[in-house]
Image (cartoon, rainbow, N blue to C red):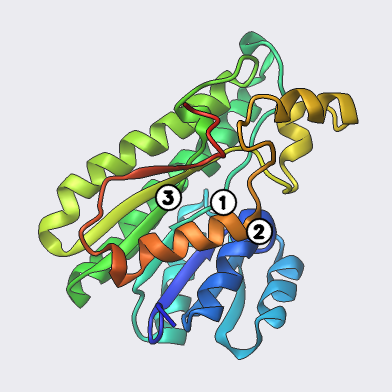
Amino acid sequence: MRLQGKTAIVTGGGSGFGAGIVRKFSAEGARVLVVDLNEDTAAEVAKGVGGTAIAYRCDVSKNEDVVAMAAAARTAFGAIDILVNNAGITHLPQPMTDVDEDEFDRVLSVNAKSVYLTAKHIIPHMRENGGGVVLNVASTAGVSPRPRLTWYNASKGWMITATKSMAVELAPEGIRVNALNPVAGETPLLKSFMGEDTPEVRAKFLSTIPIGRFSTPEDMGNAACYLCSDEASMITGVCMEVDGGRCI
């Protein structure tokens, strides 16, 4: 029960890595606001963990939605101890010049602007409470970029730099900020990363991961739980690869 008595917001919590983080946090004693653009999947995840989670619909790229989300969390929990910025999207693998402007804007809004918006509306609350933990879910794409995913790679590199800068700025106020860099996993985004989901494409992708498998929601939940728990009280500004050796 490493998160007993803690409260958390997990964006993109309705599926994939986010759902794995919600399940682990709830199992370790936290109360969780399961935030997702798809309210039905958020509700399904929240129902699956019982009374420790509440589903909430939010477009994390929109200021008014994030303002309402922060207020809902405070109303439900009284205080926000942990913020997990997990929501993310990608564009399909293609030459960088073929990605249209609307798609570029959406990737940067969801993957980067959302971190700015949640910081703007939740960090002041953490300051008032004397501390907190922020965990950004970036990607190995921000460390070891793959071709044809240039703007997605760039958005995750942005998250990594933002994590380190936030950590330095907020450390004196008792707020820790870290990130996780997963390799692709069995999530709704897997097909988008690979372009197509065939046994041949999977085998080629897996050949780049020394451990020989994709990241799982459980892998992410375990790593997130550690970094957001008091066991990691001396750890801030770390961007931890959860990638089976992909970035070595």
Looking at the image, tell me whether mark 1 or mark 2 is earlier in sequence order: 2
Q: Position of residue 33 (x, y in %)?
A: 53, 74
Give the mark nearer the N terminus: 3 vs 2.
2
Q: Is residue 96 left or right of residue 238?
A: right
- For numbered disc 1, what is the local secondary structure? loop
Q: How many marks?
A: 3
Please identify, in this view, whether the residue under mark 3 or under mark 2 is nearer the observer.
Answer: 3
Lateral position of residue 23 relative to residue 197, left or right: left
Which amino acid does the dot numbered 3 rest on?
Asn
Relative height, residue 95 to residue 40 (above, below): above
**Measured Cα–Cα span from mark 3 to mark 2:** 18 Å
Q: Nearer the viewer, mark 1 or mark 3?
A: 3
Residue matched to label 2: 37
| Quadrant of the snapshot with the N terminus | bottom left
Residue 34 appears anywhere in the view: no
Reply above or below: 80 against 197: below
